[in-house]
Structures are given as C-alpha cells and as structure tokens.
Image: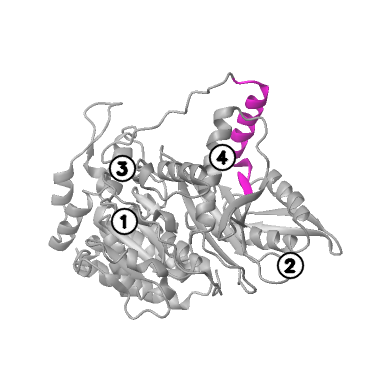
Amino acid sequence: MSETVTRRRKGPLKNRWSEQPRGNLISDMAEKDSAIPSSEDEGGRQGALKRFSAMWSSLRKGKRDRVKDPEPSESPGPAEADNTSRQHRYVSGQYFFEYLVVVSLKKTRDGSSYEPQITYQFPKRDGMVRYQKEEEEKTLKAITLFCFPEGINWAPLTEYHSETFSFVLTEVDGSRRNGYCRRLLPGGKGARPPEAYCIISSLACFGLFSKIFDEVEKRRQISMAMIYPFMQKLREAPFPAPGNTVEIKSFIPESGTEIISLTRPLDSWLEHVNFAKLFSCLTDDEVLLVFAAAVLERRIVFIADELGTLSQVIHAVAALLYPFTWQHTFISIVPEILIDVVMAPTPYLLGVQKRLLDEVTDQSDLLVVDLSEDKTKTFIVSIGDEDSILPPKLQTEIREVLSTRQNKSTVEELNRVVSEAFLQFFVKTVGHYSSYVKYSHAGGQGVFEKRRFYKAIDSKTTRHFVKRFIQTQMFDLFIQEVEQQQPGRQPSGIFHKKILEYQEKKKSDKTKKH
C-alpha cells in the first residue's frame, strides 16, 4: 500500500522519560509530567500526551468497567443539541467520517526545527460548549503525534513518495476510532516539508479510505478549496452495506463532473486487513510464531522503516485472533516521544520505526519482529518457546491451508484463505465452549465450567494449550459476553457457523466409521 520513502533528517531526537512506567496502563506514564522533556509548546504537548494516555488505557483483568460520559460544565443550549444530533447521525453509520484534518510541519519559534500543527479541518466543529471544545483540542493535539511520529527534527525535502498508514484511537471506555493518514509532499518548488492528511472515522475499512485519499490528493494538486466540496459530498453519502457501492459526484475544473464509485468489501470483518503485506514480510512459519505469542497475550514489537508496513502488519496480526479481540495496548505506530511505552510490563502490540531499535532491544520477555527487507534475522529478541505453544498437529493443518493461498489472485480471496486457517484453529481448540456454560434458572446469568471444558479435550497437547489460553483476557471477555446471553439463545456469526459445520462433519465421519 505504501512505497519506499526518501527522507532526510538531522538525526534522532532523544526524548527519554526518567522513570520506568508502573502498573497496567499507559496512562501511568502521563502522570509523570515533570519527566516529560520541555519544549516551546510544552503545555500543548503535555495535553496531547495526557489525551494519548487516556486513549490507550489497557483493560483490566476481569469485567470491564464502563466510563460514564462527563457531566457538562455548562447548560446545554440549542447549538449543543444540534451538535449532539449530528454526532448521533455520525455514530449510527450515516456518515463516512467524523472529520478530515491536514497536519503541516511548521518551523518552531526559534527556527531550529519543525513541529506538526493542524492547518485545516473539515467540518469545523461549531456550537460546542467549553468542555467539548477542550476535549476536541486534546484529541487533535494527539493526532498530530501519529501523523508525524518521528519527532520534530525534519529537514525540507525535494523528493518524498506518498505513503498511507493507519492507527487506532481507543477511548477509556474501550470504544475505538480509526485514523487513516496519507503523507505527501505538497505542491511547490524547492525543498519543503511533507504534510499529512488524516481522516478520523469509527468505520474500519482501510482500502476504502485509501481510495478516498487518492481523490483528496488529486484535488489538493489543484487547490485546497477543491477538497471541501468532495468531502462534503462524501459526508452526506450513506456508508454502503458489505458488498455494496456508493457513488459520489464531484466537479473538477477542466475535467467536469466525475462519478467516484466506492465499494465496500463483502467480508466486512476483514475490510481493514490485507494479509498480503504480513506474508510478504514473514514466512508461514514465522507468522505462526507471532500468532502463538499473540494468542498468549505477550509483549510484541514490530520493527520496520515504513509506516504503512507497520500499520498493515499489526492490524493483520490482530485479525488472526478473530473471533477474539486484543484487549491490551495496541499502537500500530509509536510516536518517538512515547517510545518508553516499550517498558510497560503488560501485554502490547506495538509498531516501532527501525531507527528506534536500540530503544527496544534492551527489554526482555518480549518478541521483537523485524519486518524490514534488509533484515539479517526476523526475531531480534524472543523468549524462545514460541514454537512449542501451539499443538503440533494444528500447526501442520494451518500450514496446509496457507499453502493453498498461492492460487488466489485477489485481496479478498487471500484474506478468506488466511482467516479460514486461523478461524478453524479456534474452532478445533475452543469451539465446544457453549456446552460448558450452565444456567441455574431461567433468565439467570450463565457460569462457565472451566475445568470440565478443558478436561473434555482428548488431545493432550491441545488440552495443554487450551489451559493456558483460557487464562487470557481476550478469552475471559469472550466468555463473559457468552455468560450474559439469555439461556437458550443461539449465538450467531461466522465463528458459530464454522463450529456447527465442524461438529456436523465430526458426526458424519463418526457415522461412516460405524
């Protein structure tokens, strides 16, 4: 998705916090305000860090606590009510995106370096009360860190191939928004710094937003004023259902009115993923080792030069865990100023640019995976037991399914083959879970019989794996949601469908034997 980037900088920026973070949350780090290096925009940067820390709070072990909405500091008026209505329409899926911002590199007051600043925002947030404006300002400050995670030491460039990447904004209540970013060199002559276009949306569809960026970039080459009408048309358009297409009419001088078709992939749960990048960076066996570490919720750091590679690979690894969801710290591209997050003792999936490798390798009990083309070895740091985590027979079955992907020509076909391989792994290891959720009375909450569940597994190696897997937070949360369902209610979704198919096949095979 991204191309090789030609960059020139004045050298790495060292921003080290003086104290190792403690506890389970990244927000623990933000409490050390005195340890954050000062700058000319110290207040704004610290505000961004606080906002960032709140968004990447890992969920605690056990039941998830929901954070209540903040109480308004001013009485709501008609303007706020209108804003709330518009926000409701956005959340309900009526809008493609929440807003688009342009982040430019501006020289600092002393002229010694550059710092990212938002120079354009669509739509403008009017009619907000004070606390809403303050929250949005903090969010926008945090976004600038992800659009330019390298830090402030940039030099003007004459050549820069545009690149597209994404990140996730996770609120303290667990809700997530997606940030899609394209960096490019703005029009002009001579050396100049790049700028970033960033779309914030609750919708996860990387391919669709990449195409939107193609249209934004085309209009930017004409004039910034050409971006507004296109984004307005897009914002008014309904987000299509899986497999459907929406058409946007947009006028461009000298070209006339164009019709842009945006098609949503049929497999909606895979629309944010392109497994091709993962398997171009890692072999099948290496992917299995990474998957094994992720299944047991270990600390994993991915290293690469390109931001697009980092974001695509880390999203692909998280998708391998379906139907389970990674519950801990998830940062596809770690801003340089926040590199000390690698010292957090709790599980994480992190993407770190290769020039910061020395900041990572002094850690132990983690897996550091080099995705670079010029790597000498893939696993720079490892615990060493990754190849013994998954049951050998099931590893072989995954490899066999993955070997068939060579015949697939489209992204959708490849995604289907890869997802099927890992989905079947969970079907065969924990697909019998529903038989061990017992209800004491009608309408009561179910109780998962953990010991009976894993004792029912015949294979010794599979049983050993499952005993470890059911201790993870992702399985714990999955089972909690099952326990809270009404008795007798049949689960739905592709995972349940695959479980039923597998159970029917086992019955059929057993009947044939007799």
Q: Is residue 325 left or right of residue 176?
A: left
Q: Amino acid at mark 4?
A: Glu
Residue 468 coordinates in the image, percent (x, y): 18, 54
Mark nearer the viewer, 3 or 2: 2
Q: Residue at x 34, y 35 (%)?
A: 485
- Please say whether residue 230 is one of the residues in the magenta stretch: no
Residue 240 coordinates in the image, percent (x, y): 62, 50
Snapshot quadrant of residue 424? bottom left
Lower position in the chain sequence, tag 4 or tag 3: 4
In the displayed structure, 126 sits above or below 260; it is above
- Magenta region, main secondary structure: helix
Magenta stretch: give its range.
76-100
Label 3 crowd (10 A; few <14 / some 14-19 / many >=20): some
Q: Is residue 194 visible?
A: yes
Q: Amino acid at mark 1?
A: Glu
Q: What separation in Å lies between label 3 and label 1 (alpha carbons)?
A: 27 Å
Circle 1 residue: 504
Lower position in the chain sequence, tag 2 or tag 4: 4
Circle 4 residue: 137
Circle 3 residue: 477
Mark nearer the viewer, 1 or 4: 4
Kindly state the secondary structure of the residue where label 2 is placed: loop
